[in-house]
Image: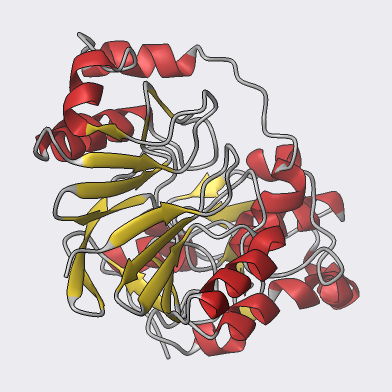
Amino acid sequence: MRPRIEELNATNCKTYLVTVGERAALVDPVRERVDTYRKVLSERQLHLELVLETHMHADHLMLNRAQKDLLGAPLVMHTSSPSPLVDRHLREGEEIRLGEAILQVLHTPGHTPDSVSYRRDSAVITGDTVMIGGSRRCDFPGGDAGAQYDAVTRRLFDLPDDTVVWPAHDYKGNTQSTIGKEKRDNPRFLGKTREQYIDLMGKLGLPFPDKIQQALQVNQSGFEPEEVVFPLVAEVAVVPPIAPNDLASALRGSSPPLLLDVREPEEFVGELGHITGSLLVPLDALEKRLPKLAGYVDREVVLVCRAGARSASAGAILTRAGFAKVKNLEGGMLAWRDAGLPTQR
């Protein structure tokens, strides 16, 4: 049975309902419309099996813990997603079963490191990778215009021309396109080399979304503003990174940095483990623990989390509190693991 795809929001920001018989998945749900989604599911007697996110969003709030529990379906994202609320992490080429149908996962980074597209037969939900007649910005943390060009031209444009494109946004009243049309007409890619595309995207000069301060760190961390006093996004952006191998070398030195792991306790002892000697201080407890950390204010401190997002926020919080030598483990424990460095559980 072929999946049916419908858009539910009727706005520039799109949420898709994918159904196979009575089985359903929501793709990129928006927090303030959860009641609408529940009404549609109830009225049509659909069983929600999955909540699929195409990437970590910066322009709207994603589901919080309570809403995820209310919907009763696992949250699915790419393995590089920083959110602790994810129930299943995906990799390139994995398959997702929805009823009798199989959805293929295409890792299409560039807008964000965790961007994916979901493909089934003659349709692909492209998230913020390729739009109708355009593409999404690459200047958010972790953005990479070269990776986006590769994802579009070497992955999505290799799909059959009649593949229907369902993007995460559209600002011109369009609903869908096809791969063939985007290959022929999309001005962002038409006739452009990889270097020309990178140059073009670097000169867009777009303002940040109005809701980025309210949305990005909430989505990345899984916490609400009443649980964590988040720093400004601009403060987060200037926390200097340290690469995994450089950190490993520093830890072998005579004056090793203090490691603060800001994940949740279950993550600390979970599949990624933790770096030996790390002090666990979950992000929502960091502000309260600052007085007890005051003795380290002049020592080098490295913040650690899953993918480097929560720890960047934590680094900005410490910097604002007067800590002079704060760094963020670039790529978090995912990058540490990929570098083949030792962990403890």
Tell which of 64 and 163 is nearer to you: 163
Q: Is residue 316 left or right of residue 198?
A: right
- At a point 29% along the width and 76% down the height, the residue shown is 21
Please state the horizontal and vertical placement of residue 51, each as a whole percent of the image: 46, 70
Q: Is residue 125 left or right of residue 170?
A: left
Instruction: Return the residue found at the far front.
Output: 43
Q: Is residue 65 left or right of residue 321?
A: left
- At a point 75% along the width and 45% down the height, the residue shown is 213
- At a point 29% along the width and 39% down the height, the residue shown is 165
Please state the horizontal and vertical placement of residue 304, each as a whole percent of the image: 56, 66
- At a point 69% along the width and 45% down the height, the residue shown is 236
Looking at the rendering, in which quadrant would you find the N terminus?
A: bottom left
Rendered view: 266 above or below 104: below
Please state the horizontal and vertical placement of residue 156, each as a whole percent of the image: 20, 38
Q: Is residue 67 left or right of residue 76?
A: right
Instruction: Return the residue found at the far right.
Output: 291
Residue 309 in which image quadrant: bottom right
Tell which of 89 and 277 is nearer to you: 89
Residue 221 in which image quadrant: bottom right
Please state the horizontal and vertical placement of residue 206, each as a whole percent of the image: 61, 20
